Image (tube, rainbow, N blue to C red):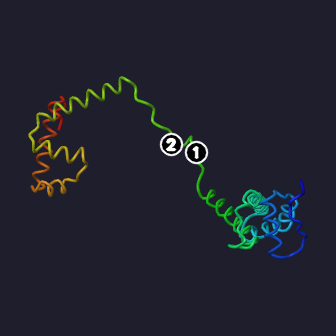
């Protein structure tokens, strides 16, 4: 079977680089890629250094870009851009991706804010349920008006002035109903302190 790789001679010219990319895309031509690498890798490294990357990072980005050129050669369209523009765009995008990763902090799974609270013990769950049941029983003894203001204030976290506006009653009435309701609930729960 004859070798179908393109015979591309070294030398300057955008057409030559497009031909080299085509050879890489169509035939996996390692010689064509070596020529591309030899020409573009040092230029990409210089470009990365001009963008502010340190030498080691610039070298790494240049190599990653050339590896991407090898992998993506089939997507090169000479009708849309020349080879150099396409290769430098790949390098620029890799640099942008790297900068985004640097700005995004790594997740520390040992951070106390990320550690879930331990599951409550069974006796704590039962005590909470009993307390809730006692509070519901105490609230059932309140008048409808008192229940309404307690619900709005404590369960819906509505400010007193907003409760007054919503129910179309004076602010003093809201406070009075809350005070009387809390006194009755404390009495029912056995906590008669003011």
CB-based contact (under 8 Å), mark 1 and mark 2: yes
* Pointer 2 residue: 114
Residue 191 screen position, x and y as percent: 19, 31
The kind of secondary structure element at disc 1 is loop
What is the quadrant of the C terminus in the image? top left
Q: CA distance from mark 1 to mark 2?
A: 8 Å
Give the vertical position of 113 relative to 54 (above or below): above
Please tell me which residue is depicted at 72% across the width and 59% down the height of the picture: 72
- The answer to whether residue 140 is left or right of residue 41 is left
Asked which secondary structure carries label 2, the reply is: loop
Q: Quadrant of residue 57?
A: bottom right
Q: Residue furthest front?
A: 1
Point 10% across, 45% down: residue: 145
Q: Position of residue 41 (x, y in %)?
A: 81, 65
Give how far across and how far down residue 32 sits, in percent. 85, 63
Is 105 displayed left or right of 61 in the figure? left
Q: Locate residue 139, reporting x and y percent.
A: 16, 35
Name the residue carrying label 1: 108
Within 10 angstroms of label 2, few (less than 14), some, or many (20 or more) residues? few
Left or right: 26 in relation to 138 = right
Classify 146 as above or below 73: above
Residue 63, labelled with which disc? none
Res. 147 image quadrant: top left
Instruction: From this view, report whether residue 142 is shown above or below residue 177.
Output: above
């Amino acid at each position: 079977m004859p070798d179908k790789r393109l015979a591309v001679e070294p030398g300057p010219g955008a057409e030559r680089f497009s031909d080299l990319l085509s050879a890489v895309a169509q035939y996996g031509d390692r010689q064509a890629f070596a020529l591309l690498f030899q020409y573009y890798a040092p230029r990409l490294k210089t470009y990365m250094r001009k963008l502010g990357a340190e030498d080691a990072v610039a070298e790494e980005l240049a190599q990653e870009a050339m590896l991407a050129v090898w992998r993506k050669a089939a997507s090169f369209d000479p009708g849309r851009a020349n080879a150099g523009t396409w290769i430098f765009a790949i390098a620029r995008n890799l640099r942008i991706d790297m900068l985004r990763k640097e700005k995004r902090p790594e997740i520390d799974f040992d951070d106390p804010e990320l550690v879930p609270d331990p599951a409550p013990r069974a006796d704590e769950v039962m005590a909470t349920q009993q307390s809730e049941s006692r509070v519901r029983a105490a609230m059932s003894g309140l008048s409808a008006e008192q229940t309404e203001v307690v619900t709005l204030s404590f369960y819906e976290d509505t400010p007193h002035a907003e409760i007054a506006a919503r129910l179309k009653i004076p602010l003093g009435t809201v406070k009075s109903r809350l005070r009387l309701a809390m006194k009755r609930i404390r009495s029912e729960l056995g906590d008669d302190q003011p």
